[in-house]
Image: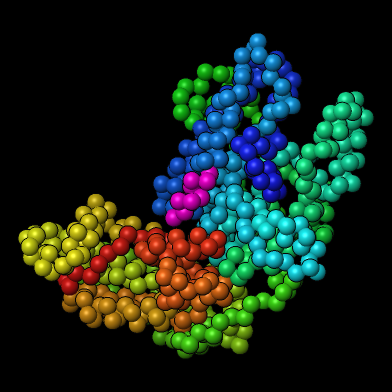
């Protein structure tokens, strides 16, 4: 995996090292190799922390976790095979590292605004491009294009391309590369044979690479089409090349969020990554000149936009009309207080925004209304049926000890085949109450549900809920905005299958259309979406069942 899409054909193929291993004797080289191995261990630790955190961008993507761990462990294995003894002649020209690239990728994934990661360091399959496309020959031949991260930022799907290269070795085009090679040859008196070998090496130029990505993005299916491409240069970018990106492709540093600089020297000095540090710590280095640029995709390029499917049960325009009419009647906190003021349910609801939603938008422009910062202003969070049940369930509201006090035979008669499922939820609730867990998730958020969820929830509560659960359900519905079923076009472009059920596509797609994350325990559907390559912002919660309480 080389920067800008060169795929790793073998385990020995690596990105050119950002850390300079030139000069010095073999002892110094051995120390540098040990430092690189320590960096690998640090990256592996960070990946494991990301995969274990329920709030991280990788919490629901086991495939991405495996990919990152495999790459980091492969790099560590590669470094461990290198000879470092002084009497062995190590050819530095054959040395290369990929750890800088992995560090940058993991650093991006650690940021709280990076959500819905569906692919990491994997190629994206592409449909055949029309012959008129400037990159059709190359892309059609490969049928895939490498993207470092596919995820969501502020509810919008994006592609990340990450480079940890020395900015002096990032070339704009072939002419730029030849001129630089000749200049280096004259200045350093490089051997002619070495220069020829260097020219034979497969090289990707930034301008060509960006053009290929823009063509691929514009012609991707709606489910994987990004709104923008984020270019992440962890070691900076030459001002001349940056100017060309801004002039030719409209690249901008105005992203609406900030990436902090990252530096590993302090962690290495402290012996991070496991084991005691027995080599001299690396010298302190200034933070790299991080450069992050965004290129927005012109959706008018290439083929026409796919039409938004017609949804029989409603549309986004109906949702806006409904919200406009109901804004003045939106309940206050006093309206939503349950009977027992001291319950965790009331405490949880009180953390949410319950005032009127400002919906001063043109309903005639409903297709793009959610993109006009409506959901960002409202801090919306979309509930599916599993989330609503979890909030009102007797298990979540103090009935755990009452359930455990009953005999096993009575519970089996009551819950039938769901007995083990309910008992597992009771034990989970005792160890970690779900209302406390969701308190931070819902704080300052405005809850929304689509009409399909509202209908299904009312039906389930009427059939299976007890008096207290029904009371909490009534109060909860008063605190939520009900919008019409209005799934996004990219969600509905996915085929309806057993794993991608139509009703789930409507529920999650409505949240996607409103740029709102969906709170859910339906991780089977989330995994099925991730397997399609589509990035979708979801928040996982533990399941709860109605108990008749």
508 sits left or right of 456 in the view: right
Residue 61 in magenta? yes
Counting from the top left corner in percent of width and height, residue 272 is at 49, 30
Horizontally, residue 397 falls left or right of residue 270, namely left
Is residue 353 among what the camera can see?
no
Main SS of the magenta segment?
Answer: helix
Q: Quick check: is 359 in the magenta stretch?
A: no
Q: Position of residue 69 (x, y in %)?
A: 50, 41
**Front residue of 177 and 9:** 9
Residue 409, image quadrant = bottom left
**Residue 74 appears in the rendering:** yes
Which residue lies most toward the right here?
A: 186
The furthest residue to the front = 141
Q: Left or right of 135: which side holds 415?
A: left
Rendered location of residue 307, percent (x, y): 62, 81
Residue, x 82% and y 34% (percent of image)?
Answer: 198
Q: Residue shown at 66%/37% (left/top)?
A: 13
In the image, residue 182 sits, relative to residue 89, either above or below, namely below
Instruction: Specify the quadrant that holds the C terminus.
Output: bottom left
User: Where the N terminus falls, by quadrant?
Assistant: top right
The residue at the point 76 percent across, 63 percent down is: 136
Q: Where residue 361 appears, x then y in whole percent?
A: 58, 82
- Residue 411 picture quarter: bottom left
Q: Is residue 152 above or below residue 505?
A: above
- Coloring basis for residues: rainbow
State which quadrant residue 463 falls in: bottom left
Magenta-colored span: 60-68
Identify the residue shown where x is 19% and y is 65%.
Answer: 417
């Amino acid at each position: 995996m080389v920067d800008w899409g060169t795929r790793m054909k073998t385990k020995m193929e690596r990105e050119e090292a950002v850390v300079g291993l030139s000069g010095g004797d073999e002892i110094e080289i051995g120390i540098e190799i040990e430092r690189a191995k320590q960096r690998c261990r640090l990256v592996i630790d960070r990946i494991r922390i990301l995969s274990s955190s329920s709030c991280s961008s990788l919490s629901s993507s086991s495939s991405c976790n495996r990919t990152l761990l495999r790459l980091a462990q492969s790099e560590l294995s590669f470094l461990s095979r290198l000879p470092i003894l002084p009497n062995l002649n190590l050819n530095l020209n054959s040395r290369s590292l990929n750890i800088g690239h992995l560090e940058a990728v993991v650093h991006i994934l650690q940021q709280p605004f990076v959500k819905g990661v569906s692919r990491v360091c994997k190629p994206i399959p592409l449909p055949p491009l029309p012959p008129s496309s400037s990159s059709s020959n190359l892309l059609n031949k490969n049928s895939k294009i490498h993207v470092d991260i596919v995820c969501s930022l502020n509810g919008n799907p994006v592609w990340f391309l990450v480079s940890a290269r020395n900015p002096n070795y990032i070339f704009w085009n072939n002419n730029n590369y030849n001129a630089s090679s000749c200049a280096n040859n004259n200045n350093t008196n490089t051997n002619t044979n070495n220069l020829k070998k260097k020219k034979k090496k497969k090289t990707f130029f930034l301008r060509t690479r960006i053009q290929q990505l823009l063509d691929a993005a514009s012609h991707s299916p709606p489910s994987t089409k990004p709104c923008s491409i984020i270019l992440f240069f962890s070691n900076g970018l030459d001002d001349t090349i940056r100017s060309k990106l801004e002039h030719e492709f409209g690249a901008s540093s105005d992203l609406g969020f900030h990436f902090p600089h990252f530096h590993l020297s302090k962690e290495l000095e402290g012996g991070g990554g496991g084991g005691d540090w027995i080599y001299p710590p690396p010298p302190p280095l200034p933070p790299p000149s991080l450069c992050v640029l965004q290129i927005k995709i012109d959706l008018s390029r290439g083929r026409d936009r796919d039409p938004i499917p017609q949804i029989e049960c409603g549309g986004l325009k109906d949702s806006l009309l409904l919200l406009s009419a109901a804004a003045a009647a939106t309940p206050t906190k006093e309206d939503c207080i349950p009977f027992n003021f001291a319950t965790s349910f009331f405490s949880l609801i009180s953390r949410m925004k319950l005032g009127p939603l400002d919906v001063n938008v043109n309903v005639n422009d409903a297709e793009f209304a959610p993109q006009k910062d409506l959901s960002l202003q409202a801090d919306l969070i979309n509930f599916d049926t599993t989330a609503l049940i979890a909030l009102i369930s007797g298990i979540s509201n103090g009935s755990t000890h009452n359930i455990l006090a009953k005999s096993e035979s009575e519970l089996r008669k009551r819950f039938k085949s769901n007995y083990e499922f309910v008992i597992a939820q009771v034990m989970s609730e005792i160890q970690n109450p779900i209302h406390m867990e969701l308190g931070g998730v819902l704080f300052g958020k405005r809850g929304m549900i689509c009409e399909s969820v509202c209908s299904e929830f009312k039906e389930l509560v009427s059939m299976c809920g007890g008096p207290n659960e029904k009371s909490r359900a009534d109060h909860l519905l008063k605190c939520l905005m009900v919008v019409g079923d209005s799934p996004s076009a990219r969600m509905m472009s996915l085929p309806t299958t057993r794993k991608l059920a139509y009703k789930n596509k409507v529920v999650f797609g409505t949240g996607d259309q409103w740029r709102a994350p969906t709170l859910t325990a339906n991780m089977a559907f989330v995994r099925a979406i991730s397997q399609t390559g589509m990035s979708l912002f979801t928040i996982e919660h533990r399941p709860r069942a109605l108990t008749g309480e």
